[in-house]
Amino acid sequence: MKKFFILFTFCSSLFVSCIPSIDVFEKNVAIPGQKWQSSFQPEVTFTITDTVSSYNVYVVIRHTDAYNYNNIWINATVMQPGEAQPQSRRYNLALATNEKGWLGTAMDDIYEQRVLIQPLTRFLKQGNYHFSFRQIMREDPLLHVLDIGLRIEKAK
């Protein structure tokens, strides 16, 4: 009977460990007045506990059809747990093409797009990661931008 109990406990723990966890994180920050000042740097914080899995990292941007450009240039900065210096990278996010028009999904005159910026990324440290975004377009403030955010999906 004792062996059966041990075997049952072992099998139960295997079954419970196979239940999938939530594999998506997304947080968006509203741009005040739909006018993104270069001095306004929205920040998103998330926690990583799984350092073995790979993730796809997206920038999520929402804008109106009155937005004046086919793209947006941003600086994305990440502060990793235990690091003294943040790391920054510049991205040119395509929002439209001359052939297809606006990319992404639309609801009335609002467009949302998820742009993959880091495919198959492994976070090497557990803890809180802090991302911030800064628009680096020539127009300041940048008009008709509603939200900017971050989406992290566990890669399959």
Image (cartoon, grey):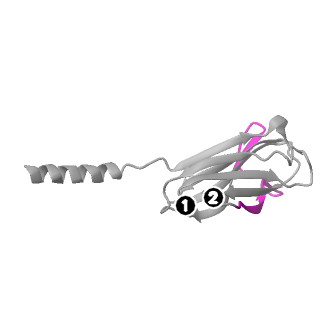
What is the C-alpha distance between the residues marked 1 and 2? 8 Å
Q: Give the residue drawn at x 49%, y 61%.
A: 53
x and y percent of residue 13 in the render? 28, 51
Name the residue that disc number 1 marks: 125
Q: What's under tag 2, amino acid-wise?
A: Gln
Task: Please state the extent of the stretch shown in magenta in the rendering.
Answer: 85-114
Residue 80, disc? 2
Asked which secondary structure carries label 1, the reply is loop
Q: Give the residue drawn at x 74%, y 61%.
A: 88
x and y percent of residue 98 in the render? 84, 57
Q: Give the residue drawn at x 87%, y 45%.
A: 37
**Residue found farthest to the left:** 1
The first of marks 1 and 2 along the sequence is 2
Please tell me which residue lies in front, 57 or 103: 57
Left or right: residue 22 compared with residue 6:
right
Left or right: residue 128 compared with residue 134:
left
- Residue 130, can we see it? yes
Asked which secondary structure carries label 2, the reply is loop
